[in-house]
């Protein structure tokens, strides 16, 4: 299966580790082409880099093409900003893109308790992996 990994770029290291793990299971995996630039940087540096890539490199459209070419997306939703299983605005858009394109949607962890868009995530009927990448079939 071809899988596009979606996540806050703050989790670039985890994104690349998940890519390696999924490839070891035989999957073809796409991550943002900018992900390697984030490795080893502080959260503040990553946030500045994210703004640059969104505004100057059209990273949103760039990754939409990866989603379109994939069979599924995997959302890496870890704790961030005090929110368990955080999913940010950009990742929410990527979930919407995947849904409209008819892609299977996997969430690494359960849907976050984010008041403004929990029901939208529930509506796309993601497969919750509960931390186990081996459940992707």
Image: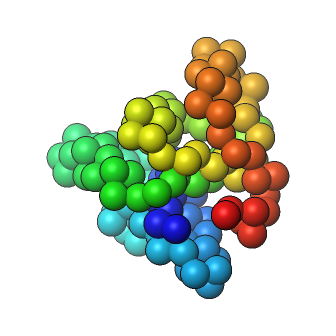
40, 132: nearer the viewer: 132
Left/right placement of residue 64 relative to residue 21 reads left
Residue drawn at (33%, 65%), measured in percent from left and top? 33
Looking at the image, the residue that sits furthest to the top is: 116
Q: Position of residue 123 (x, y in %)?
A: 62, 24
**Residue 119 position (above or below residue 29):** above
Which image quadrant is residue 133 in? bottom right
Foreground: 40 or 6?
6
Image spot of residue 94 (x, y percent): 44, 40
User: Which of the colour schemes (rainbow, by chain, secondary structure, one colour) is used?
Assistant: rainbow
Q: Is residue 13 visible?
A: no
Q: How many marks?
A: 0
Measuring from the top left, give residue 75's x and y in whole percent: 59, 49
Q: Residue at x 50, y 62 (%)?
A: 3
Q: Is residue 137 visible?
A: yes
Residue 91, placed above or below residue 50:
above
Horizontal and vertical percent for residue 102? 45, 41
Q: Is residue 85 left or right of residue 60?
A: right
Front one among 12 and 97: 97
Question: For the view shown, which residue lies furthest in the bottom direction?
Answer: 24
**Quarter in which the C terminus is drawn:** bottom right
Q: Residue at left 47%, top 74%?
A: 28
């Amino acid at each position: 299966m071809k899988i596009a990994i979606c996540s806050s770029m703050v989790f670039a290291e985890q994104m690349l580790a998940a890519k390696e793990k999924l490839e070891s299971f035989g999957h073809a995996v796409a991550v943002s082409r900018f992900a390697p630039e984030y490795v080893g940087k502080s959260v503040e540096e990553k946030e500045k880099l994210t703004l640059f890539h969104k505004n100057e490199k059209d990273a949103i459209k760039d990754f939409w093409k990866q989603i379109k070419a994939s069979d599924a997306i995997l959302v890496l939703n870890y704790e961030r900003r005090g929110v368990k299983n955080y999913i940010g605005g950009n990742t929410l858009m990527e979930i919407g893109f995947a849904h409209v394109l008819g892609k299977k949607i996997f969430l690494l962890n359960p849907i976050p308790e984010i008041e403004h868009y929990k029901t939208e995530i529930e509506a796309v009927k993601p497969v919750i992996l509960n931390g186990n990448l081996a459940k992707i079939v």
